[in-house]
Amino acid sequence: MMSTVSAPSAPLRLQLSRAALQHNWRWLAQMSGSAICGAAIKANGYGLGAPAVMTHLAEAGCRDFFVATWAEAEALAPLVDGLALSVLHGVREDDLKVALQGQARPVLSTEQQIARWRGAGGGPCDVMVDTGMNRLGLDWRSDIAEAVRGLKIVTLMSHLACADDSHALSVVQQQRFDEIAQRIPAQRYSLANSAGIMLGADYHFGLTRPGLALYGGVPRQEAAGMLRQVVTPQAEILQVRRVLSGDTVGYNATFTAPKDLTVAILNIGYADGYLRGFSGTGTVLANRQALPVVGRVSMDLLIVDITSAPGLNEGDWLDIAYDLPIAASVAGLSQYELLTGLGQRFERRWI
């Protein structure tokens, strides 16, 4: 009889809060007013694990979900029953076989995609109109009515370029989309992302599509203090060691100990998404006590000064400070990068 050996536990993990995720969606749904509130779960649920994110948000009442590619849609196929799933990057020739199965809708953004969908006998779809971002979508100045003639459009949508600040382009895009929505028949219309929701009712239309804010990111100051942190990286101490005054620490000797220190070596690094921008600036928490990152972040390892926290030992777990707005400011990264860059070596634990 063959014996089975269980896989070893991961020495780093993400502690993920279902309650915080659901709270954030409910707050965004409230802020969306009369509009339905959906959820962007592309990039593997912004790094948290799309199947779990979809399940928890559906439990909270969300029914409309958005991914980027058909591979992402296929991974969620077992969960789609009773829900709506849209694929933001349209439909290529290689995607047609999966797309025609009807478990998700393509968001068509070019005349070629529309022709491809028509030619294949495709059914209900979404359509993206570009109103000034110059990314995906039919140009707002083109004959959109002719381009989409005969399509069964569920959601006609556009995307705001500058909703996270006070750029005048947001007003221009809203006005352009409002005019288009009055001419192009669809079951509903959608413009606002997380930041767009904060801009008010004129931007909500029939459906909002938050992403970042669901996961604890703060897209605009109006949301500060209202959203809860969803993800906390945690890493195990691999070694505790003494560093003598004058010794250097880490690659390129960028840190010199000003006195005798005790440091902990943690199992996390830039290969896990904890990038070099945190070198000498990041913070680790031991029972909420802040401990500084010293030296450069390595590919797989992090060095932390634990002198002020005696009693920490090899095998102990520490929290990585990861409040998204604060961490983004410290590391010089965007909140989106902090989320979507979280690596596959983390064990993802929902609590």
Image (cartoon, grey):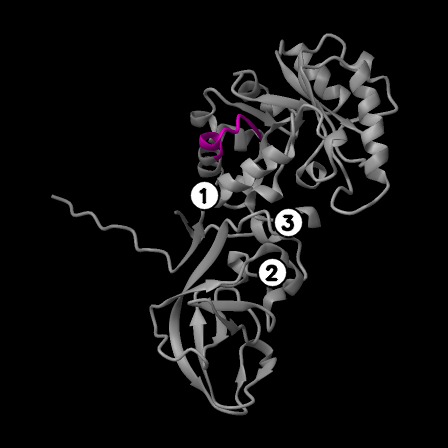
Q: Position of residue 298 (x, y in %)?
A: 53, 68
- Residue at the right extreme? 141
What is the crowding at mark 1: few (fewer than 14 residues within 10 Å), some, or many (at least 20)?
A: some
Whether residue 220 appears in this view of the structure is: no
Q: Is 263 situated left or right of 174 in this image?
A: left
Badge 1 vs badge 3, beta-carbon distance below 8 Å: no
What residue did someone put label 1 on? 19
State if disc 1 and disc 2 touch (CB < 8 Å): no
Q: Can you say which quadrant of the picture contains the N terminus?
A: top left
Residue 234 position within the rendered picture, expressed as x and y whole percent measured from the top left: 44, 60
Query: Does the magenta segment cover residue 6?
Result: no
Amino acid residing under circle 1:
Ala
Above or below 84: residue 132 = below
Q: Amino acid at mark 2?
A: Ala
- Secondary structure under the numbered disc 3 in the rendered image: loop
Against 336, residue 177 (above or below) is: above
Q: Is residue 228 above or below residue 129?
A: below
Pinpoint residue 19: horizontal percent, then vertical percent. Answer: 45, 43
Q: From what the image shows, is residue 317 above or below residue 231?
A: below
Foreground mark, 3 or 2? 3
Residue linked to disc 3:
218
Give the crowd class for mark 2: few <14, some 14-19, many >=20 residues within 10 Å.
many
First in sequence: mark 1 vs mark 3 = 1
Residue that appears at 67% across and 15% down: 187
Residue with the mark numbered 2: 327
Q: In front: 121, or 57?
A: 57
* Disc nearer the start of the sequence (2/1): 1
Of circles 2 and 1, the one toward us is: 1
Real-space CA distance between mark 1 and mark 3, rounded to the nearest whole angstrom: 17 Å
The span picked out in magenta is 57-65
Residue drawn at x 54%, y 36% is 26
